[in-house]
Amino acid sequence: MSQSASAADPLSTPEAFKAGLIAAVSAYLMWGFAPMYYKLTADMPAIIVICYRVIGSVLFLGAFLVMSKLRKEVFAIFCDFSRLRYLLVSASVISVNWTIFIWSVETGRVLDASLGYFINPLVSVGLGVVLLSERLSKAQLAALAITIFAVLYKTFEVGELPWVSVVLALSFALYGYVRKQAPVSAVAGQLVEVLLVMPFALVGIWYFAQAGSGGIYPAIPVEHPWFLSLLLFTGVITAVPLVVFAFAARRLPMIYIGFLQYIAPSIHFLSAIWLFGEELSLEGLLAFGMIWFSLVIFSVDGVMARRRVAKLA
């Protein structure tokens, strides 16, 4: 890399690449080990954990933005409905994703969550075809077909649609699509999202406090400050990987981001079997095998396509 290129783009230096790689791996590791944390809050219903996750995110991201230069952007977003409308949709979609993910951890369905995040990249490709009229290469089409077949195979063999996997994959893919369209930064956009959901979170906590949370602990566990701290810290578990990932995404080529994104569901898969004692049936193993095969096709095709573009350039 020439000195002039480095001077023109300080994010393209070897030092920036190394920092971005460390940050990306760190973010995916944090997302990968998240189920272990949510096992600590499993005595509280998932919907209440989500309420505290939103409040904790507001507190953490709010403190982060107070010390940064993004305050003006947050206020500008709320004053500009053309941008705010994207975040209204993304906030709704990610709230569904969070709730189903935490519920899957609490009910011993981490394997289903893992499968959902494995197929997420291919679902994103499918959304690109449907919503953006993008064209698939033959390899991408084959990978997507194998993924659909794997889901159908598991549905017919087990007798139940793996809806947790499907909902997680669809919701996160749709979230990524909406956020990609939204002209906002990652951190400011995340804060606006949780601020939009926060009134519902406060009402939810109040409602469950009146009606009874249905868990071992009350909806507002003031008599158990350590557990209340665990609940609020879910906001940090949410926000820190996002901030770290935003740092990495600006410094790494997308091909690295694409490969590294399989770290988190791989950890989910291993922890579900070795730590949480979930049972992997033969049908489930075959479905995972087909998904992994489709991801190999998808990844190799991506590498070859980028090499062809680089040669043409």
Image: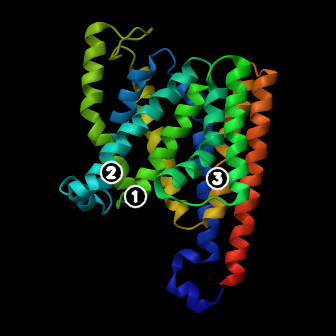
Which residue type carries mark 3?
Answer: Val
Give the residue displayed 67% in from the left and 46% down from the top: 144
Give SS at disc 1.
helix
The quadrant of the rendering that contains the C terminus is bottom right
**Residue 205, position in %: x, y?**
30, 21
What label does residue 181 carry, if any?
1
Which residue type carries mark 2?
Answer: Tyr
**Marks 3 and 1: in contact by CB < 8 Å?**
no
Question: Nearer the observer, disc 2 or disc 3?
Answer: 2
Give the residue displayed 41% in from the left and 51% down from the top: 178
User: Is residue 210 in view?
Assistant: yes
**Residue 113, position in %: x, y?**
61, 31
Q: Which residue is mark 2?
A: 86
Which residue type carries mark 1?
Answer: Gln
The earlier-in-sequence mark between 1 and 3 is 3
What label does residue 113 carry, if any?
none
- Measured in 3D between alpha carbons, the distance from the residue under mark 2 to the one under mark 1, in whole angstroms, is 8 Å
Going by the image, does 125 lie left or right of 198?
right
Q: Which residue is mark 3?
A: 25
- Measured in 3D between alpha carbons, the distance from the residue under mark 1 to the one under mark 3, in whole angstroms, is 25 Å
- Measured in 3D between alpha carbons, the distance from the residue under mark 2 to the one under mark 3, in whole angstroms, is 28 Å
**Marks 1 and 2: in contact by CB < 8 Å?**
yes
Give SS at disc 3.
helix
